[in-house]
Image (cartoon, helix red, strand yellow):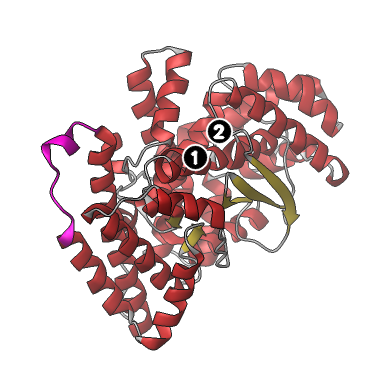
Amino acid sequence: MKSVLVVLFVAAAAALAAQARPATPMNDIAERYVKLVLALGQKDPDYVDAYYGPSDWKAEAETDAIRLNLTLEGLAGMSARLINELPPLSDADRRDELVVLRREYLSRQLEAVQARARMLANARRGAPAMGFDEESRALYDAVAPTHPDSYFDATLKELDRALPGEGTVADRYNAYRRQFIVPADRLARVFDSAIGEARRRTRAHVELPADEHFTVEYVTGKPWSGYNWYQGSFRSLIQVNTDLPVYIDRAIDLAAHEGYPGHHVYNALLEQRLVRERGWIEFTVYPLFSPQSLIAEGTANYGIDVAFPGGERLAFERDVLFPLAGLDPAQAEAYARVRALTDQLAYAGNEAARKYLNHEIDRAAAVSWLARYAMMSPEAAEQRTRFFDTYRSYVINYNLGKDLVKAFVESRAGGSAARRWDEFVRLLASPRLPSGLR
């Protein structure tokens, strides 16, 4: 996730995209879509997550925002007009699944542009915000299931039996987990090792550009734990937030989610296969509050399990990462069992966000709820509510996204590990929408 607008340009990639982009009605709409997203980014500093198209388009968006005095309502109207101008599919188009998906993708992404512009306009007028579920449907093409508190109680009872000590389950969980904090002076080597293994496993199944790479920075003062800033030309900057303790299990989570086979691979494949090979310029821009985010976050989270299936994650953590971190490898298996139980509480964060953003509870109650049902420390829960303030219903993209991606890929893989990788990569390099995963 991110807190400030970063728009990065790569001239070589833009030139290649321009050369490969013939003049067609769809390509004209794609270009206008990119410029529309950049224009909305002038009004919303969190909106444009990445851009590596022609640099003059960004300059044009900045100039037009002033020269034309573009309003949020005007941008919403422009999006609606573009949707109406989308050309119908020809018989030849229908024989190429990616072409069909491209039209659906542009239509739904434009609807999300329209929704985001209207949300911002309403907020500036002081009008009531959309409800949590209405917003997630408008922006992310999906609605997360609603779970009562009792849904999580069975898992809390299992954790109660599994955790040592006395006190509340949350207090005991956080006390237990403290013994698995990676010391600050060992964090880089642990994370580097996890990245190296995730990359090795991914490249055994995915043909990536020869010059793909990323760099890692350690930062503070962010509402997220990790973020991939894709810069084009198959390069990323990954930032890891060290405000709060980094636990040993986060090494693989971050390495796979942000890097291999997660966000870095997702963006690199889109650039290689859709921008460079097909000339589809719309994929040079990534509007954060859009259906694309559910695919991006869902594949990044599911990708952890694809790269480290079954007991392979435990074995690597126990044999490599625990010793690198100076932790006791004999505790790795017990910690993995506890972690598996807390993973069953993934949807607790959605419920906290839904209650908080629908004004059913205040910040203090949300912090308390997250501590009880999501096993978060008070500090982590407070940070999470700041995430809710900025990104709102975006939280569904992590857990619902993972579940939708998992069901989609595994229904096609038929239990084959090799086919699972094949279907996963096919999804990464496609314009498929969340509604197309069901």
Q: Position of residue 181 (x, y in %)?
A: 78, 40
The answer to whether residue 131 shows anywhere in this view is no
- Which residue is rendered at x = 72% and y = 38% of the image? 177
Answer with the quarter of the image where residue 1 lies: bottom right
Asked whether residue 30 is drawn in magenta, I would say: no
409 with respect to 225 (left or right): left
Asked whether residue 91 is drawn in magenta, I would say: yes
Q: Position of residue 56 (x, y in %)?
A: 48, 69
43 with respect to 259 (left or right): left
Secondary structure of the residue carrying tag 1 is helix
Q: Position of residue 95 (x, y in %)?
A: 19, 31
The kind of residue on which mark 1 rests is Tyr
- Measure the C-alpha gap from mark 1 to mark 2: 7 Å
The kind of residue on which mark 2 rests is Pro
Callout 1 touching callout 2 (CB < 8 Å): yes
Count residues near mark 1 (Cα–Cα under 10 Å), then give few for <14, some for 14-19, many for 20+.
many
- Which residue is rendered at x = 42% and y = 46% of the image? 275
Q: Is residue 220 above or below residue 328?
A: below
Q: Is residue 254 above or below residue 22?
A: above
- Which residue is rendered at x = 18% and y = 38% of the image? 93
Count residues near mark 2 (Cα–Cα under 10 Å), then give few for <14, some for 14-19, many for 20+.
many
Q: Position of residue 215 (x, y in %)?
A: 71, 47
- Which residue is rendered at x = 34% and y = 28% of the image? 408
Quadrant of the frame with the C terminus: top left
Secondary structure of the residue carrying tag 2 is loop
Mark 1, residue position: 266
Which numbered dot is residue 261? 2
Give the residues in magenta: 85-96
